[in-house]
Amino acid sequence: MTGTPNSQVFRFIGVARDNSKVKPTGDERAANRAALIIAIDGPSGAGKGTIARAVARRLGFHHVDTGAMYRALAWKALHESIDLTNEAAVSAVAERAEFDVIDGRVRVDGHDVSVAIRTPQMDAAASVVARQPAVRRALVERQRALAALGGVVMEGRDIGTVVFPAAHVKIYLDASPEERARRRATDPAHASGKGAAAIQEVATALAERDRLDRTRATAPLAVAEDAIVVDTTTLTIEEAVDSVMELIHQRHP
Ligand code: DC
């Protein structure tokens, strides 16, 4: 469980030098911090969105929601009446569409889809396109390009394992299935029914989506070897954000 050598990270931001043996100066440290990549992975309802946004705000970093990218792609493909299981057609959309999933915006080709993508139908649709290797190749390339933004808190399923295996800090957020279902069912940003029956319905759908995310052949949801697992089941949002901030400071004083 050691930190990632800076040399690997510098490769991502295109600075061609090996910084691992040289003590950085103050200016270099500031520049390095500005290019930090914090990867936050985990299943639905673990608190990734809320926590990643708050951490990005505290650090003055950009927040990137890669799940929103898969959702926006599914929305765009459906909008164009494309069969979601047609990998060639869906990945062609992934390659040509413009996605903006930074700092709370969710736009695809200029359309604001921030509300339209948070429905049970879009949960299922995003999961279908996220299983396709050609789609993942196209979107991962776009996600990597966002390192150029500088300090980034990127949330998803494979950020620490595939997108940025050399991310400076990797956090894996988790929570019990019951708590995750309760959060999802009561999330005002997510359209679903209310009450105990709705929670049960959400729990069933969530368990199935988790199973698909964990068992798919390409980039399954998994804990990166050097990730720190934070269980948020009994934590308030404030406590969870504080724990993640503390871990970031420990890894990157
Ligand atoms: O985090 P979310 O529920 O908005 O993600 C939507 C879907 O996209 C979900 O099925 C998981 C998938 N996803 C993924 O496969 N890889 C990512 N980096 C982010 C999300």
Image (cartoon, rainbow, N blue to C red):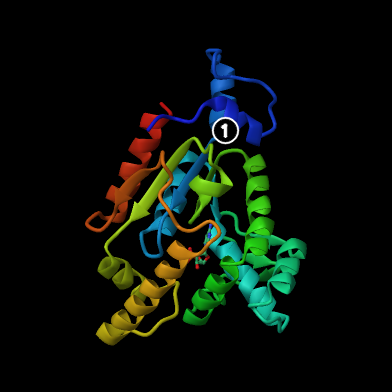
Q: What kind of element bears circle 1?
A: helix
Which of the pair 2/118 is nearer the observer? 2
Q: Which residue is mark 1?
A: 34
Q: Residue at x 56, y 39 (%)?
A: 151
Looking at the rendering, in which quadrant would you find the C terminus? top left
Q: Residue at x 40, y 45 (%)?
A: 171
Relative image position of residue 67 (x, y in whole percent): 53, 62
Q: Is residue 206 left or right of residue 61?
A: left
Check the image and report above or below for 5 versus 21: below
Q: Residue furthest front?
A: 217
Relative image position of residue 72 (x, y in whole percent): 62, 69
Which of the pair 77/101 is nearer the observer? 77
Relative image position of residue 199 (x, y in whole percent): 30, 79
Looking at the rendering, in which quadrant would you find the N terminus? top left
Residue 109 visible from this viewpoint? no
Name which residue type carries label 1.
Ala
